[in-house]
Amino acid sequence: MESLYYAAIWYIIISLVGLITFPLTYQLFKILPDRGYSISKVAGLLLWGYLFWILASLGLLNNNQGSLLLVIVVVLGLSIWTYLKIDQKEIQQWWQANRRSVAVIEILFLISFLFMTLIRAANPEIEGTEKPMEFAFINAILSSPNIPPHDPWLSGYAISYYHFGYILVAMIAKLANIPGNYAFNLGIAMIFAMSSVGAYGIVYNLLNLRSKKSAVGSRVYALLGPLFVLLVSNWEGFLHSLHSKGLFWKTGQGGLLESGFWNWLDIKDLNIPPTEPYSWVPGNFWWWWRASRVVRDYDFNNNPLEIIDEFPFFSFLLGDLHPHVLAIPFAFLVVTLALTIFYNRTNAPEKYPGLRFTRETLILILVAGIVVGGMAFLNTWDVLFAGVLIAGAYALAGFYQQGQPKLLSILKEFFIAGIVIGITGLLLYLPFYIGFASQAGGPLPNLIFPTRGAHIWVMFGPLLLPIWAYLYVIGRKNTSTSSFLKAISIGVLILLILWVLSLLLGLLIVNLPEVRGIEVGSFYLNFLGAPDIAQLFREAITRRMVNSGGWITLGITLVATLVIFIKHFEVRNGDPNLETEFHRRIIRRADSFVLLLILAGTLLLIGVEFIYLRDQFGWRINTIFKFYYQTWLIWGIAAAYGMAVVFKTSNHLGTILVKIVLVAAVIMGLFYPFMSLPNKTGNFNPANGWTLDGTSFLENRSPEEMEAIEWLRNAAPGVVAEAVSPTGGSYQWPPGYARVSTLSGLPGVLGWTGHESQWRGGADEMGTRQPDLIQLFCSRNIDETMAIVEKYNIRYIFLGDLERATYKADGTTCPTGVVDIKFDNAFVLVFQNDRVKIFEVPGIENDYLHE
Amino acid sequence: MNKNWWLDYETIYYSGAFLLGLFFRFYNLGQAPLSDFEASWALQALQISQPANFPEPAAIGPNPGYVLLTAALFSIFGSSDFVARFWPAIAGSLIVFLPMIILKYSGDLFRSQTNNTRWIGILLAYGLAIAPGLVTISRLAGGPMLGLGFCLLAAAFWLIRQPVLAGISAGIAIISGPDIWLGLLVLGVAFLIISLLTRAQNRDSSPEEATEEIKPGLEDTEQILPHSGQNTRRDFLIAFVTTILLVVTLFLRYPRGLGAWFNSLITFVNGWFTPSGIPISRMLSALFFYELLAVMFGTIMIFWAIAQVIRGQPTKKPLLFLIAWVLIGSILILLYPGRQVYHQIWILVPLWALAILSIGRLVIGEKINPVSILMALIILVLAGLFWYTIASTTRIPGDYTNIGVQLAVLVGILSMGAMIVGLISIGWSWKTSQTGLILGLCMALFFYLSSVLWSSSQTRHNKPQELWVTNPSPGQERLLTKVIGELSSWNTGFEQSIDITSIVDTPSLRWALRHFPNTRFLTHLGREELPSIVITHIDDEVPAIAASYRGEDFQWWAIPGWTGALPPDVPRWFAYREAPLIYDKIILWSRADLFPSQSLSPESVTENQEPVILEDPLQEINPQVEEDQ
């Protein structure tokens, strides 16, 4: 019942937020047929969150329900003021014409929310992967009296991570008094539903802008948006099914199964023979995990390196509330804003070459700053994509607006818009950057990790096929030899420049002098496993040639997109006042925008073929992960739109065949969700019953610890000391390291050290906490113990099984293990059950006032 | 009697009522120490007024209006119990002016601006000045009086077209705390219902009748009050928003007050899901036993008005609104799970208005027969006898030897009253008898009310048994601070310099010790700490260091044990306000070396001696110290 109640409250709040914000989106996205209704919930949440966060960060508000409500009222006031300025007749007309679309959007939101709520209720457990980290953030935000929230795993510090998404989720939870263990799962359901209507809205708007003839058709075809973005998955699921059925395997020498196909495909687990009984439905544990590890990189010595290539459905299936998931609906807000900017500028009555400081421009820059800056705070990796897309849309609009479009002036506008929006976003979110340390360490050349074509196709096939079909449909009569040659030249030039740049960058790094005592060149070579630069370069060229399928596929996509752009460019240059009849019919502005999306996605994928961003791992695990994800989102939109355009074209043999292929591609992409869901949810028969409580399973596994943690939740706030893993402790859950701080929201002395190190780009802040905690638990000397207690301002010491196991007598660092009598003498036993003791440090002054 | 002459005297009467209201609200205002409820708010005000003295930035709860306005006073006058209660007291006093503002300055807004109406207004002002519930809550720091007072003033100013004053009052009211939302809900629902009824009535009656009934004298008002509707709304809004922004941010010095303001709404909403545990019987008892006059005559008025409506007689909209306000308010307050007794002040003003209207309808304006006056005196004597009999019944707890005789006397008194009413009706007229009865009852209830007021408002005693008291004041707060002050003077030469560690952490204790800057509030005493003074709860384990300390216990809380009360306790409570009390104590541990000729030797720290606890320090120092302060 609690789950139902919380879900209903959550749904009501986010719906109200959308409703409150709609007058604002109505004005802002006036050019769009749906007036931004589909994105109003996302925009409302962002605006509410931004205002609350910035006011609280500046010390003007506390992190409490009243402040949250106050900001909602401010948004409401702004909205009412905007509403009163809108011509009421116009609103009525719009409502009459669009009420069915509004109804469809609301129904889609409700169905999506219920769908994901049900899935989460069938497997709500907050366990595995980085879920404990995300849960810890939410709980820390809920329990922090102020913003920025405290770091649950490093007491005395604020969170140093792009945590805006967690603030947004925690805001709703706090306002509605929903505990973090429910908020975690409801947050996922909300993000899914907002993404669903976000994708729907963009496709709906694009189709409507393209042709207003069939609103009904647009409403139906727009459903392809959420389908492609959120449900259609990569083809690994389909291949896994074939593999599980034993297809393409034959018995070879010695009776062993062999397969040239699966070996050639080289996807982990699929390149080993299946086990009997063969079945279309894969049965091995967490088989669906493999879909997020399709791409494989190998170092110089052919040792595999793990690469993450998630896609939205996988994320939602996993139930991971990670920043890249939290950012999905906001990415659609970026696309919507880009579309609006594009149309606004192309519709402008007068032609102007660049930014002018009118009131509208300033509002737009401010909004773009909030949105793009918000992306950086939500998922920093997305800021590039967001900024480029909005600046690209602005510059592309200049192409339409200028009588004689010049490539250089368009590029100039692109950079000016990008810089202005970037600086605005930076300034608007300055408090975040002041306390933010990152593991990002600049670009590295991708010399020996070219992605194989097969992997690109397995990963993006369901999207690439509709995109290629769409490019073919709109480009088949719209190319000329000159445009084709120009496109090939530019495409090849881009690839060549990037390749040469990566080689030069590699050369530069290998010859870098010593930095902070590290021979960078040798370090880099050692990391790749290469003996010297010559052999590295030889391997780089060889691999680039052998594994050419990837960049050729992307090159074709790039060239195909460029051909249409260039042709359009030529037409505009030739006759500035008149588009050809063909262009009016086929190359609409909506198409130009979709081409921009395709181009952006292609460039993102091409980019990671040559350059990647250095992090603590050293290889391109995160760069692929994040950039592929962004590409999936915008290509998903493009694929949905493209498929709709293809299906709207007249039927003749060629297009019929294309349509059949596309449907097959989609079906192959839907294999994964249909087969993975029963596996993940235990055939919808949850072990702990249907619930949205993400920690209910812990009540059975470690009831004593949960009882103790519940006690802590209600106790006076303070720093808690618990065991820290000698090896980092990450992913050891449940109930693993950092369990107390994670579940209670109280700041712990130290949590997952590996993650802290990632978030802060090093271990400086952690200092000697790890050995100090050993000392705290193991030392027999009370004064030493008290010194550590004072050093970290510890209030509670948690003594459970994990502490006793971690700090057991080893004769060296912990000679006699945990000594109970020391704690009994030095501290006050405030809680005890069969397995857990909680000690409170005496002499700590109570907080002066609680609200 | 010319108009100017009357105006002068009317003003004088109202001023008299205001002075009376002021007296009851301000007399001995700082006498009782702040209770936990009051201290929790006053401490927030203190923290804001003295930010340098506190390590953490102030975080205030959902009562920003009171906290920030009081913080401003603390900055000027310093912190004291009197200052802490100042704003509610002044708001409660201003309520007295409501009848004057509405009746005297609204022109002919209420049409029947006759002498009768004027007298009713004056009587109502006096009623509001002495209504025990209103007076008690006016003396409650952090209570809902700020909201009620300024909300009603806002309405009154709005009615007389003073939009700026209305906006300022409304601004203060809206930030006054969670209870304002309950009040607004009550008023809103009442207004809605009356509007719907009036609309329905409008449809059924002719347009002329409808207009006359719905907007009495509005055209006259328009002439008297020149503001146009749009300007009025604009001025009101500007004043309203400006007041909120300035007050809730303490003149832009404390912007977090804005968040606290909205916390009040959250707290109110949470009240619908979090029961307070106050039984309905206590709510009704508080209303009946303390506001008997208003309840009795207000109820008569309600029934009369309902009968009028049923008979199809024209009934004025303001009267219907007052009735709806009382009825809907009573229902909503009783239904509200987070209810407190003090929430009932939201229905006291209309209840008193109805009661005075009722008395006015029955008595005022009629020529009074001397027989009625005589009869009233007899009724008064009988009422006195009635009360005396009840009091004597319960004078000695558990003594029921004469209970039969006393019950017979009570029945006899009531019978005699009934006989007198009957005989006067037969001999003279029902009207004479009715007037005499009402006058007599009014006089008797007035005396009863005065008695109730004197004790319930805590002007004289700190009585935890009073039903309107939210939670009682600490029993021996003054004594505790006096003892600590003396210890400090002996040992440090300064009255407030001694170091104190308190393991008891309650707002009232924090407030009591606010002038001792070296006070720490801990959950547990630190290792090897030997502060000069340690304060523990009577139920806490004796501290390990107790051997080196001398302990004195102080009665801190006294909570009425209503659940343990027996039927005979009820009349006793009625007569003497006595009821079973549960006492709770704290212990003041003074280090032995603080006393002359005592020293703190290392042995005394470690030896496991029995602690010395002085029982009942009141006996030693001044047995009447709390009673007579």
Image: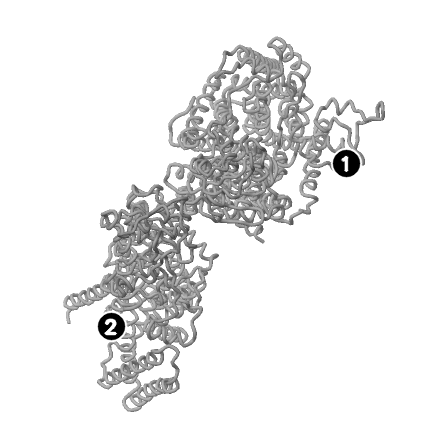
Task: Tell me which residue sits at (85%, 24%) in the image.
Answer: A254
Asked if residue A461 is positioned above or below residue B620 in the image, the reply reads: above
Asked if residue A446 is positioned above or below residue B317 in the image, the reply reads: above
Q: Seen in the image, is A40 located left or right of residue A727?
A: left
Task: Tell me which residue sits at (42%, 63%) in the image.
Answer: B333
Instruction: Specify the quadrant that holds the N terminus of chain B.
Output: bottom left
Q: Position of residue A146 (x, y in %)?
A: 42, 40
**Residue A465 found in image quarter:** top right
Q: How is the image coloured?
A: one colour
The circle on residue B116 is 2
**Please, what is the three-letter code of the amino acid marked with disc 1?**
Trp
Asked if residue A841 is positioned above or below residue A383 in the image, the reply reads: below
Q: Secondary structure at mark 1?
A: loop
Crowding at dot 2, Cα within 10 Å, few <14 / some 14-19 / many 20+, comes out as some
**Residue A490 found in image quarter:** top right
* Labels 1, 2: front one: 1
Asked if residue B478 is positioned above or below residue A416 in the image, the reply reads: below
Furthest residue in direction right, as rendered: A254
Residue nearest the observer in this picture, B436 or A754: A754
The circle on residue A827 is none
**Please, what is the three-letter code of the amino acid marked with disc 2?**
Asn
How many angstroms separate mark 1 from mark 2 (CA)? 94 Å
Task: Tell me which residue sits at (42%, 55%) in the image.
Answer: B540
Does the image show residue A340?
no
Q: Are marks 1 and 2 on the same chain?
A: no
Crowding at dot 1, Cα within 10 Å, few <14 / some 14-19 / many 20+, comes out as some
Q: Position of residue A486 (x, y in %)?
A: 58, 14
Residue that numbered label 1 is attached to: A280
Instruction: Specify the quadrant that holds the C terminus of chain B.
Output: bottom left
